[in-house]
Image (cartoon, helix red, strand yellow):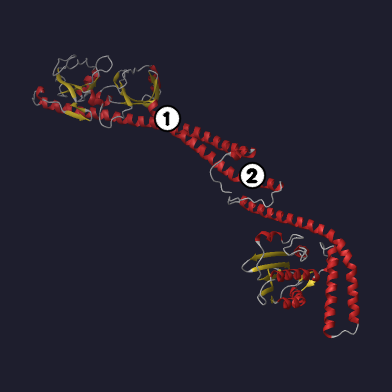
Amino acid sequence: MPLGPIKTSFLKSRVARRIFGLFVLCALIPLLVLAGFTFLLTSDELETQAVRRLKQTCKAKGFEIYEHLLFLETEMRMIGARVDQGEPLESISFVPYASDKGSGNRFLNLTLVENKDFVNPGKGNLAAVPALESRERTHLDSGGTLVLTPGEEPRPPVLMVHRIHSDDPASLLLVAEINPVYLWGVGSEGSLQPEVDMIILDRGNRVLISSLPAFQPDDRPLGHMRPSPVSGNFEFELKGKPYIASYWELFIKPRFALPSWTIILCESRANVLGPVSHFKTFFLLMILLTFWVVALLSVILIRKSLVPITTLQEATERIAEGEEGTRVEIQSGDEFESLGRSFNEMSRKLEEGRRLLVQSAKMGAFGQMAAGVVHEIGQPLTSLLGLAELLLDGPVKGEERRHLELIQSELGRLREIVIRFRSFSKTPHEAQASLAVNRVLQETHRLLEHQFHMKGIHCIMDLGEDLPRIRGDRNGLQQVLVNLIMNAMDALEGREEGKGLIEIRSCESGGRVMVSISDNGPGIPEDIQKRIFDPFFTTKGSGEGTGLGLAISLSILHQHKGTIQMDSDPATGTRFTLSIPAEASDR
């Protein structure tokens, strides 16, 4: 039976519900385990990638700041050389720079300072230069450049100091305030991602710059940084918002005589795990979709398996209630389809068997009724047969003797028929013998030859050669043939003389001997074809037939393990085909 639209009525079955629950359970548990495992792995991997990205960006940012310091040092030396050649400082223009967020000067202020503890204001509002320590003076005397962050307040200015003449300790100092926008690379194209914040601390944990205004270098983040002072990762909270951070220490002391700066890049944990949230939503939808697909497939599979069973169960119940010929249509493409065909064949055989049982019951009733009639006609038949024998013992010759011998033969056959009427439903095993079907056909033809001639019917004999022998009762088989041929002659009544035709053919097919008797009569009406083998059913007029000929013929063929098939068409006539198994060969 085609599956058609998905229906769930079959889930009323306990077996179906059990199987469906097992399907869902087997699909749900692996899906939940897979979802949880995948979610944890993805979350950890995304966080690891974010930390790794922050660490790499942190180092890149440190190198960028260091390169800016080196470029500024070179520019300071160039300015110092121009001043040393007598060019007024006021006439020297700052070298501008450009970024994706604007342009400006690399130095905010630039002035010359005497080699004292404090400086005089020069060009612009330059912050005061603190007293230099001996190591800083030594660094300047050696031709180095100083980087200072004076003052104690957070976000101090960043100064760069260079001696005009490194070999003259009394020479002027060139002091410049570095533009923090340029130094820290704030706004530079590709410098930092928008969601990444930067914090730079000096050795004293002062905040030199921070994109998180509320950030304070309290003990918590610094405590995470102490185990590895060079680089590492840590987490902290700011106003209840968790952050993931990576830090890297920039060593500038050898070049600029300044303790190292610590560069910290941080990103909110929500941004880091943002893809995880999207993945979680997408993965949940995928789980639901997968679950529904599994449920749908399980429904289809269970229905494909259980609907044929339900169909067979209902058909079996209908047969049990007496609905003969019940058929099922199962088109599943598997063993259920084969089972459906077997069920239909079983139903057909049950229907056929029931018809045979009804036929047997009718024949049994007929046997009981006929027993009395047979008993009454048995004695007169014996007397007639005896008289025929006495006449044959006399001086009878020629045509009369041949007629008496035919009468004696027919009376003997009639006596056999009477005997068979007493127990026609069972042919004794010892009455069966090896027979040649063609010979029985020829004898039957000779027996009825006179009637063919009298009725003007043409009979054609087409007998196959070398047919295998069968095992059966000669008289019974001849009785079947006589009944069929006589019915054919009756069907040709009213035909113009010479137009009636009866064909008798024999052949072998599949280990069985086939005999067909056909006529070119008007055929049998379709509405009575199914009843022609019923006892006492006849289409002849009153007193012309008993309706027992075909019923007895069917019973005799059944005893020979044979079958009879009828084909009738008003245009071509009627054909009866007998099929009898061939006798087993000893060869």
Q: Is residue 583 visible?
A: no
Q: Nearer the viewer, residue 75 or 185?
A: 185
Distance, label 2 to label 1, CA atoms, is 47 Å
Q: Residue at x 81, y 70 (%)?
A: 475
x%, y% of residue 145? Answer: 21, 24
x%, y% of residue 284? Answer: 47, 33
Residue 298 falls left or right of residue 282: right
x%, y% of residue 478? Answer: 78, 71
Q: Secondary structure at mark 2?
A: helix
Residue 563 falls in which quadrant of the image?
A: bottom right
Q: Nearer the viewer, residue 104 or 568?
A: 568
**Placement of 330 over or under 225, stated as above or below:** below
Disc ID at residue 310: 2
In the picture, which quadrant includes the C terminus?
bottom right
Residue 394 falls in which quadrant of the image?
A: bottom right
Q: Nearer the viewer, residue 19 or 372?
A: 372
**Placement of 125 over or under 330, stated as above or below:** above
Three-letter residue code for mark 2 = Thr
First along the sequence among labels 2 and 1 = 1
Q: Is residue 448 visible?
A: yes
Mark 1: few/some/many CA within 10 Å (<14, 14-19, 20+): some
**Placement of 101 over or under 302, stated as above or below:** above
Q: Are marks 2 and 1 in contact (CB under 8 Å)?
A: no
**Placement of 568 over or under 501, stated as above or below:** above
Q: Residue at x 68, y 61 (%)?
A: 529
Residue 89 falls in which quadrant of the image?
A: top left
Three-letter residue code for mark 1 = Ser
Indicate which label's residue lies in the foreground, 2 or 1.
2
x%, y% of residue 303? Answer: 58, 43
Q: Secondary structure at mark 1?
A: helix
**Residue matched to label 1:** 277
